[in-house]
Amino acid sequence: MTTPAVLILLGPPGAGKGTQARMLEEDFGFVQLSTGDLLRAAVASGSAAGMQAKAVMEAGGLVSDEIVLAILKDRMGQPDVTKGIILDGFPRTDGQAAALDELLAGAGQTVTAAISLDVDDEAMVGRIAGRFTCGGCGEGYHDDFKQPAVAGVCDKCGGTAFKRRADDNAETVRERLKAYHAQTAPLITYYDAKGVLQRIDAMGEIASIRMTLGNIVKGVSAQ
Ligand code: AP5
């Protein structure tokens, strides 16, 4: 591959975008760019953008394109983004998709693949309600599907402090699912028309989805 890979993971809340993005980082050396994580960092920092984003995120809506694009552009301009990126949770609207195309075109790049993680909505509420992450490194876990190997100790960094997200409750998840279907799911058609769409069944085991995704990435990287 001559230019850095630009992979997009599409899918509703709980589809496994973050879980799989972190595995792609490990497997291929790409960098995960999660707009959710960037926005949560902005909220934690108390910046003006973070304060505007906070209430919207807690209600399960979408933060304005203006704020999201500003934080994403800032992150994409950092030096570690050389081998390839995995966009996790971005783009989420027509406007964001168009802005991404423009940003990439300016650097002589295009989207390498947009991969839709196809899941059943109802199962997502359970996945999200059981989710927790390491407070040290951000590694994701689940009460039923992905416990640390040693209870209470992060597999990745050995940390012992874990946290749960403020927007991970059933009511907010339903709002996030509505936002996904109204504003983000149409991007599946958008990327299909560009000839870069791949769809995978993401209702199986985490490890088997990792393998399927890895094969897709190897395939598009070889082109
Ligand atoms: P964001 O942080 O992006 O959240 P999301 O899209 O709702 O997605 P999640 O992180 O909840 O789910 P995921 O698909 O990453 O699943 P995960 O791998 O953790 O966004 C949060 C908010 O920020 C938005 O609501 C919005 O307000 C704002 N925002 C963010 N980006 C924005 C943008 N571009 N524009 C506007 N606003 C934006 O998996 C979930 C759980 O399931 C985990 O516990 C995991 O261990 C488990 N799991 C994963 N895969 C499997 C599997 N195959 N089987 C069983 N369990 C599994």
Image (cartoon, helix red, strand yellow):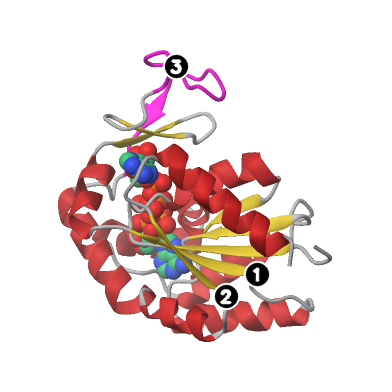
Question: Tag 2's secondary structure?
Answer: loop
- In this picture, is 132 found above or below 8? above
The amino acid at mark 3 is Val
Q: Is residue 191 magenta?
A: no
How far across and how far down the image is residue 124, in percent?
25, 51
The amino acid at mark 1 is Thr
Q: Mark 1 sits on what residue?
A: 112
Give the left or right position of residue 54, taking residue 198 as reference: left
Q: CA distance from mark 3 to mark 2?
A: 39 Å
Residue drawn at (19%, 60%) of the image: 174
Q: Is residue 159 magenta?
A: yes
Residue drawn at (31%, 61%) of the image: 55
Mark carried by residue 153 = 3
Mark carried by residue 196 = 2
- In this picture, is 164 found above or below 182? above
Give the left or right position of residue 210, taking residue 29 as reference: left
Asked if marks 3 and 2 touch (Cβ < 8 Å), the reply is: no
Q: Quadrant of residue 186?
A: bottom left
Asked if marks 1 and 2 touch (Cβ < 8 Å), the reply is: yes
Q: Quadrant of residue 93?
A: bottom left
Disc 3 or disc 2, which is closer to the eye? 2
Can see residue 190?
Answer: yes
Q: Which residues are magenta?
A: 148-165
Question: Tag 1's secondary structure?
Answer: loop
Q: CA distance from mark 1 to mark 2?
A: 7 Å
